[in-house]
Structures are given as C-alpha cells and as structure tokens.
C-alpha cells in the first residue's frame, strides 16, 4: 500500500501553473521594460498568454503522468480528506473555483469586446526597379565636393527632416510623438544602415504615399518630398543624413565577375 | 525525489521565460510605436573636465558638427534651421539662460548647462544629447561659454538652495491656489493655468513678442522638468529675459512649495488611447459639454503635430494635443472635442476650427484611406466646425428673433434673455444651453441639439481634391464653447444618413478610423496650415446581450456536473498507488 501521508502533487501542479501565470502577466511586463530599456511596461499579448498557459498546463499534466505512481498520487488528492484539514480546505477551494473559472471564460469569450486593431506592415519593401539603377551623382566626386555636399545635406536635413526625425537622427523630433507610426530612428543599425542609398532616395522622394500596400502607406507621415526638393538636394540630404546618424549605407553587391 | 521535482519545475519555468523573451524581442518594435517618449530633467552632472583651450577647441569642433544648425555658427540662435523652430533656439551671446540653479539674472553654472545638454528641453527641438560622451558635453559647454563675455567676467555663481520639500496635502494645494491669485500668477498663466492670461495674450498677439507663458496643465511640456523640485526651482530662480521673475523674495520657501503643489495638482500626464470607445447612452444624448453624462465617458488625448505632409508645410503649429470623448444612442452620435487655445479671436479668414475625419466607408481589412485627407479612390469625409461661422450664427439667431418666434413659438422667454446678455459671446452661449434645458420637456425629438449650427461636411480625395457636400446633405451640427483658454466643441450627426455614397454610416462593434485637425486663428492657421493627428480608432460599444448570462450559467452547470462525475468516479474506483520504487 502506498504512502500513508497524503500527496499534495496536485496542489504543487496548480501552484506552479499559477506562478507561471503571475510571471507572464505581472512580472514579465516590468522585466522587459528594463531589459529592453523602454519607458513603459510591456504587457504580454493575450494570444501569447493563452498559449503559454496551455503549455504550462500540458507541461504539468505530462509531468504528473510520467509514472503510474505519480499519476496515482496526483489523483489521490481527490479522495476523501479524512483527518487532514488542510487537504479538506484545498479540496473545497478547487471544487468552488473550477466552475467559477469556466464561467469566467464563458463570460469573457461571449462578451462583445473591442478587438485591437491589427496593423501589420513590412518596413523595408522591395525597391522599385526604376530606383534600382539610379546612382548618387556625387558618389565619385572629389573629397572637397563631397565634404561640401555633406554639409549642405546636413543643413537641409536639419531644416526639413529634423521636426520628426530629430536633430540627432534618432527619430525623436518634437513632432515624433504625434505619429503613431513613429518616424524612423536612423541611428538604429536596423534602419538606413541596412539599405542602399537608392532605397533612401526612393523613400524621400515618394514618401508614405509611394509605399506598396504591404507597408501601410495610409499610416505613414513621411512626405513625398518631390514637391519641393530637387533630386540633387535629396542626394545631398542622404549624404548628410548618414553622417548625422553616424552610420554607413549598405554597399551594392557587385553582380558581375 | 523532491529535488528532481524542483529541478523539473525550475527548468519548466526557465523554458517558459525564455520563450516569452524570444516572443518579446520579435514584438518589441510593434509596442514601441505607441509609446510616448517624454523625458525627465536629469539632475546628475558628473565627469567634469578642466576648462582649458584644448577643451574649448574640441568643443568648437563638436559645436560646428552638431549644434550650429539651430544655434548659429556665432551662437546667436540664428542657425539655418532656426526659422522653422518654435520655440526659438537659445541665443548664447546674451544671458538668456532659462533653466538655472542660480538667482534671477545670474549666469547658469556649468552643471546647469550640463544638465540641459543631457536632458534636452521638452516641447522644443533641443534633444537629449546621449550621443555625445560626457567629456564631449563638457567640451561643448566650454565652447558655448565663449560666446558671452559675461562668463569670463563674473566669477562663481551662487546656487540658490532648494530646501526639503514641504509635504503635499489638500491644505497645501488649497493654500497654493490662493497664492496663485495673490502672486498674480494668473495674469500670465491664466485662471485655469492654460496660459491665456491677459499679459500673455497681449505680448503674444498684439505686440508679437515671443513670450509665451507655460500651459501649466500639460506636465509633459514643463521646461526643466515637472517634478516638484523642478517646479520649485523655476518659481525660485525665475527665467532670465522673460516676464517670469523670481519669487524667492516675494514668497517664503513654504509658500513656494504650496504653489508648487498647486501647479502639480492642475497638471496632468497625457494618456493616449488608440481605441476610443463611444458609450451607448440610455435616452437623450448630452447637448452641452458641462453635462454630467460626459463624466462617465472615457477620453483619449491625442498628440498633434504640424501638417508636414503636403506643401506648403507647417512647422510652427499652436495646438499640440487634443482630447476627445464620444457617446451615441440609437439615432445620433456626439463627440466632445477639447483643446487648449489661449485666444478666442476670430476673423473670416483666420478662425479657430476643428475637423473630424473618417473614411467615407468603414474599411474592411487593413486598407484605410491616406491619413491626411484621403487619396484618389479612397475618400474621407470631414466635419468642419469654425468659430467664425458660429459667431455669425449667434448674431443671426439674435437678429432673427421675430421670424423664429413666428415659426416655432414657445421659446420667447429664452430668446429675450439672450438679447440682454449678448455683450459677451460666452454669456449668450451659456444662456443657449440653459434655454435648451428649460425647453427640453416640451420639445419634439427633431429639435434636439437646437442651439447647434449646421457645420460644413466635406469629402476629400487628397489635399487638392476637396469638395463641400450639397446643402441638402449637410447632416452634422456643432457648437463650441471657449472659456479660460480652452475650446470645448461638440459635434453630432445621425448614425445613418441618406447619402450612403458620401457619408460614413456608423455601425456598432466595428473599428472605425478617425483623425483630427485643429486650427488656431490667432496663429494665422488656415487650410493646410494646421495641427494634425494620425489615424486612431473609434468603436461604438455594443450593449451586453442577455444571451451572455445564459452561456455563463450553462458553462457553470456543465463544469459542476463534469467535476462531480470525475470526483465520484475517482472515489469509487481509486487507483492503486504502486509500491514505492527503490
């Protein structure tokens, strides 16, 4: 005959599921705020939450059923408590809270709620053919001309781009907060450093309205600068912008040889 | 055995955590988009290096790579980017330094300059220079100091001490409110702290001087920080070269803390909601902003920027945030839009105004019209309220007394009241609201929102493709109230209209994109010269259907029966616990 002492493995399983829940729901938002150096907590999305909880429950069930002994001990918690008063209390809690939990799920599932808007977008769409072939007219200029172009470009950048993209090119200009699709942070190595200059040229010239649908042109506040800036000015801005951000454009791979 | 179990649980937890971490690193960009990056005034000033000619030369080099675009090569605040800046960049050739720990008129300490370079100035273009190393920041400071000879002449600046903060409680706030009157703060900062005081509006409007009092209700725009200590420091040391003086001699330390606590109490943080919930009202919708029904409705405060999308672009807008609430019943939807505007001066050309923008059709799926006035093929509908038209409307209503009495009788008393009180526009408006209340009981349903004027409904397919709807399709009405530096404008329209092609038809439960634009007439804003928002979402809350409760009851009954069946079964046929493995 098994242990005379009552097994609490069911409680251990429930408690560990609860711990997982608390960690994901309440601790993770703060942990990630610090880890990713954000100014706000980062709540776990509800679909992720659901999956993690399903995983946690499955994991516990797998654990308690790894051997006949564990499974029998797990189920033995449901047997009459006898003299064990703590067990009796736990049993009552489980018997009451299980139907309540199911009821709450039914309520939150059928309650007409507000869906959060889905706003998926591709940040770097494919560069259009017509822009692929263009070349920076100052690419092969002498050092002095280049220096002058960079300086003119920096001035144009500070006049036209700074309100949103910021003096430091970090996407923190005074208007930046107003656009839900935040202006790009050029100092981030995942932005202008990963594209060729032609890509930047296309984005500046055609702006948000020139984006394909996969990149949600309707939400982008990037102006199509072709209305006031000449191509030469745009090339200069690109040269100045990379210097301001302290990054280098991706170099085009040589297709020949 | 126990150890093994603990280890497994621990491992399980670790795996879970790792999975969460992975998921987050993928999602973090999505979150960042809705974040607000409002900053604090950083107090620390460390790593000071000696002030010598090498440091100054190195500082000059940095200054001419990073700073001069706004502050000018000679430090006079006239850099090439300056014309598009509001507020203007600091002129370093004079003692214009605002955020100081030293007394009024004194020069700032090196540490003060370090703090500003490290913190930036909220609400202006000055960024926090985290991209400069501490050493580089000191070098730049030493160079900036060479622009004004006063730094060389005066030795040592006395720091005004900030004592321990007096505790903040309702008594302190109350005393602070009294001091706000006694010390005449309201003359510039306005009765409600909305920067609409007489002196400010005179300096700004009539004399065109660049002084603007701080709007004390928007804590995220306080220069030099919004902590109690920061506010106390500003009240104590004043702001050089502006009408904001030092109150160190005029008010005791305790009184300045009281004043600080009062300022804290009237300021708020911006809380932006991506989805605005329009509340279902039982019965009539409120027809004035003061109606208690509004108190129970959640609001969204949206940050605004100048219209920079299409030429001519607008770099120096007046409004920087707007607040919106909404309610609906089975016939109409109503919006309450509030924004701060220190003046109420309207002309035919330049008038305060607000526009609500919706897609003409509620979009299915991801695609929306372009957020700034739509595009060809995907049009938007705009409801445009203008303060100037409203003042004409008010005048017309007064003049049209006789004819109106003839047509709808009933309201003679109320309109007579109007005539006596028309000196001040606000009075008239208030009485309108009152008269409506009085009449409500006897009015037929079609007379709801009676004092509202019909506002302009337009369709746009891009900036240059704007058309006013025919007069028989103008279904929305609006009414505005301006008081103490704040506009409160209500706009209403029936949920559905007869013009399905050009009007949005509201439906419950859908996510409906909306955007706002605000014009400030006294800032010469008109047409594309305006403040705008991105797309946000409106949703008309659905009533809870009765079936929900039925489902819950069924679920609980099922759960209970299954539970007891399982318990019964296990108790009847208990599993043999196998002998302990050795």
Image (tube, rainbow, N blue to C red):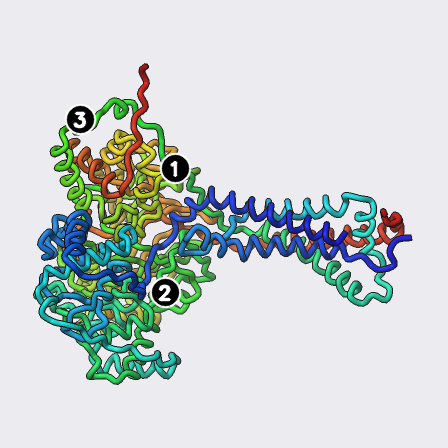
Q: Position of residue B432 (x, y in %)?
A: 27, 68
Camera-side mark, 1 or 2: 1
Q: CA distance from mark 1 to mark 3?
A: 42 Å
Pointer 1 or 2: first along the chain: 1
Q: Nearer the viewer, residue B578 or A74?
A: B578
Confirm whether circles 1 and 2 share one chain.
Answer: yes
Q: Which mark is residue B457?
A: none
Q: Which residue is mark 1?
A: B367
Q: Are marks 3 and 2 in contact (CB under 8 Å)?
A: no
Q: Chain of mark 1?
A: B
Mark 2 element type: loop
Mark 3 element type: loop
The answer to whether residue B78 is left or right of residue B273 is left
Q: CA distance from mark 1 to mark 2?
A: 43 Å
In this view, the residue farthest toward the top is A257
The answer to whether residue B67 is left or right of residue A181 is left
Q: Chain of mark 3?
A: A
Residue at 19% in and 67% down? B98
Residue at 36% in and 44% down? B504
Q: Position of residue B260 (x, y in %)?
A: 30, 76
Q: Which mark is residue A140?
A: 3
Q: Quadrant of residue A3?
A: bottom right
Q: Which mark is residue B443?
A: 2
Q: Quadrant of residue B420?
A: bottom left
Residue at 19% in and 33% down? A235
Q: From this viewpoint, is residue B454 visible?
A: no
Q: Position of residue B512 (x, y in %)?
A: 40, 46
Q: CA distance from mark 3 to mark 2?
A: 79 Å
Label 2 packing within 10 angstroms: few (<14), some (14-19), many (20+) = few
Q: Position of residue A181 (x, y in %)?
A: 35, 45
């Amino acid at each position: 005959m098994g242990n005379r002492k009552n097994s609490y493995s069911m409680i251990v399983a429930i408690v560990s599921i609860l711990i997982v829940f608390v960690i994901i729901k309440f601790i993770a938002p703060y942990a990630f705020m610090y880890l990713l150096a954000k100014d706000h907590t980062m709540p776990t999305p509800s679909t992720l939450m659901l999956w993690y909880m399903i995983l946690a429950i499955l994991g516990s069930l797998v654990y308690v059923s790894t051997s006949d002994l564990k499974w029998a001990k797990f189920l033995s918690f449901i047997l009459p408590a006898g003299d064990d008063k703590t067990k009796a209390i736990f049993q009552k809690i489980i018997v009451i809270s299980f139907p309540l939990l199911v009821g709450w799920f039914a309520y939150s599932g059928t309650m007409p709620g507000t869906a959060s808007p889905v706003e998926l977008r591709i940040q770097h769409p494919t560069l259009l053919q017509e822009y692929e072939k263009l070349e920076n007219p100052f690419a092969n200029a002498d050092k002095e001309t280049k220096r002058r172009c960079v300086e003119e470009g920096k001035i144009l950048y500070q006049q036209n781009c700074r309100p949103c993209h910021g003096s430091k090119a970090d996407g923190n200009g005074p208007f930046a907060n107003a656009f839900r699709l935040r202006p790009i942070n050029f100092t981030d190595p995942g932005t202008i450093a990963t594209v060729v200059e032609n890509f930047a040229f296309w984005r500046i010239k055609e702006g948000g309205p020139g984006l394909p649908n996969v990149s949600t042109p309707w939400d982008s506040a990037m102006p199509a600068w072709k209305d006031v800036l000449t191509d030469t000015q745009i090339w200069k801005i690109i040269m100045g912008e990379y210097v301001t951000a302290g990054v280098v454009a991706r170099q085009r791979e040589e297709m020949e040889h | 055995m126990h150890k093994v179990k603990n280890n497994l649980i621990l491992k399980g937890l670790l795996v879970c955590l790792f999975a969460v971490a992975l998921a987050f690193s993928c999602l973090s960009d999505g979150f960042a988009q809705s974040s607000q990056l409002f900053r604090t005034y950083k107090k620390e000033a460390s790593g000071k290096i000696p002030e010598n000619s090498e440091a100054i030369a190195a500082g000059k080099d940095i200054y001419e790579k990073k700073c001069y675009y706004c502050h000018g090569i000679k430090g006079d605040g006239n850099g090439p980017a300056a014309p598009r800046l509001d507020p203007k960049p600091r002129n370093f050739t004079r003692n214009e330094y605002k955020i100081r720990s030293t007394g009024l008129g004194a020069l700032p300490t090196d540490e003060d300059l370090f703090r500003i370079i490290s913190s930036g100035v909220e609400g202006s273009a000055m960024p926090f220079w985290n991209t400069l190393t501490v050493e580089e920041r000191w070098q730049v400071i030493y160079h900036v100091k060479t622009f004004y000879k006063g730094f060389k002449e005066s030795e040592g600046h006395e720091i005004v001490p900030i004592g321990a903060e007096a505790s903040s409680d309702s008594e302190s706030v109350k005393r602070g409110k009294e001091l706000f009157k006694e010390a005449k703060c309201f003359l510039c900062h306005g009765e409600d702290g909305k920067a609409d005081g007489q002196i400010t509006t005179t300096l700004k409007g009539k004399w065109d001087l660049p002084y603007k009092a701080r709007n004390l209700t928007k804590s995220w725009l306080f220069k030099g920080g919004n902590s109690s200590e920061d506010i106390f420091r500003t009240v104590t040391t004043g702001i050089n070269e502006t009408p904001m003086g030092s109150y160190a001699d005029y008010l005791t330390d305790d009184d300045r803390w009281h004043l600080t606590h009062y300022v804290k109490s009237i300021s708020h943080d911006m809380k932006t909601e991506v989805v605005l919930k329009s509340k279902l009202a039982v019965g009539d919708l409120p027809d004035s902003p003061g109606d208690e029904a509004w108190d129970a409705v959640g609001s969204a405060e949206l940050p605004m920027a100048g219209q920079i999308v299409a030429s001519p672009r607008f770099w120096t807008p007046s409004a920087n945030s707007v607040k919106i609430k909404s309610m609906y019943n089975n016939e109409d939807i109503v919006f309450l839009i509030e924004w701060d505007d220190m003046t109420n001066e309207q002309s035919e050309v330049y008038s305060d105004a607000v526009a609500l923008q919706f897609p003409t059709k509620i979009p299915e799926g991801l695609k929306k019209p372009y957020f700034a006035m739509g595009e060809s093929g995907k049009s938007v509908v705009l409801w445009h309220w203008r303060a100037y038209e409203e003042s004409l409307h008010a005048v017309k209503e007064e003049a049209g007394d006789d004819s109106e009495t003839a047509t709808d009788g009933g309201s003679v008393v109320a309109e007579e009241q109007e005539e006596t009180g028309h000196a001040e526009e606000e009075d008239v408006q208030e009485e309108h609201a009152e008269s409506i209340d009085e009449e409500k009981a006897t009015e037929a349903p079609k007379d709801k929102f009676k004092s509202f004027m019909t506002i302009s409904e337009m369709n746009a397919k891009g900036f240059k493709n704007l058309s006013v709807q025919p007069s028989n399709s103008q279904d929305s009405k609006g009414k505005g109230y301006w008081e103490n530096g704040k506009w409160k404008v209500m706009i209403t329209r029936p949920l559905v209209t007869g013009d399905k092609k050009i009007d949005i038809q509201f439906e419950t439960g859908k996510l409906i994109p909306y955007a706002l634009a605000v014009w400030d007439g006294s800032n010469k804003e008109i047409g594309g010269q305006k403040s705008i928002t991105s797309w946000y979402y409106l949703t008309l809350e659905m009533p809870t259907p009765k079936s929900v409760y039925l489902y819950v009851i069924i679920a609980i009954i099922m759960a209970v029966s299954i539970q007891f069946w399982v318990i019964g079964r296990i108790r009847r046929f208990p599993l043999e616990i196998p002998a302990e493995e050795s």
